[in-house]
Image (cartoon, rainbow, N blue to C red):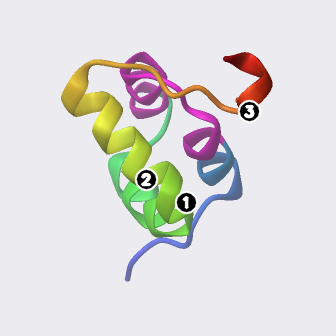
């Protein structure tokens, strides 16, 4: 039976900014719990995390036009 999404993991995945954040989550939680929580993370954050991983970059949360 699949595990239910853990709101703590969803919150941490949603706030992650770099690959190191994901590694930290992976060290603290079971893989099945992370996989169960992943679909609950907003699509934009999931895409940003995948891009950050592929490009070895960081996600800048809460950025707006005044930052440029």
Segment tinted magenta in the rendering: 12-27
Find residue 61 and report its image quarter: top right
Q: In the displayed structure, would residue 29 be above or below residue 27?
A: below
Q: Main secondary structure of the magenta part?
A: helix
Q: Could you give the CA–CA distance between mark 1 and mark 3, rounded to whole angstroms?
A: 22 Å
Circle count = 3
* Residue designated by label 2: 46
Magenta-colored stretch includes residue 23 = yes
* Residue designated by label 1: 41
Q: Could you give the CA–CA distance between mark 2 and mark 1, rounded to whole angstroms?
A: 6 Å
**Mark 2 or mark 1, which has the lower sequence index?**
1
* Residue designated by label 3: 64
Residue at the spot 34% in from the left edge and 30% down from the top edge: 52
Residue at the spot 41% in from the left edge and 26% down from the top edge: 27
Most extreme residue toward the right is 66
Q: Position of residue 14 (x, y in %)?
A: 61, 46
**Secondary element type, mark 3:** loop
Q: In the displayed structure, would residue 33 be above or below residue 55?
A: below
Q: How many residues crowd mark 1 within 10 Å: few (<14), some (14–19), many (20+)?
A: some
**Mark 2 or mark 3, which has the lower sequence index?**
2
Say if mark 2 contacts mark 1, CB within 8 Å. Answer: yes
Compared across the picture, whether 56 is left or right of 13 comes to left
Q: Position of residue 31 (x, y in %)?
A: 34, 48
Magenta-colored stretch includes residue 34 = no
Q: How many residues crowd mark 2 within 10 Å: few (<14), some (14–19), many (20+)?
A: some
Quadrant of the snapshot with the N terminus: bottom left
Quadrant of the snapshot with the C terminus: top right
């Amino acid at each position: 039976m699949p595990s239910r999404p853990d709101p703590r993991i969803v919150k941490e995945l949603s706030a992650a900014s770099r690959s190191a954040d994901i590694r930290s989550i992976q060290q603290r939680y079971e893989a099945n719990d992370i996989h169960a929580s992943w679909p609950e993370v907003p699509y934009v954050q999931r895409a940003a995390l995948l891009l950050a991983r592929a490009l070895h970059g960081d996600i800048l949360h809460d950025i707006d036009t005044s930052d440029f």
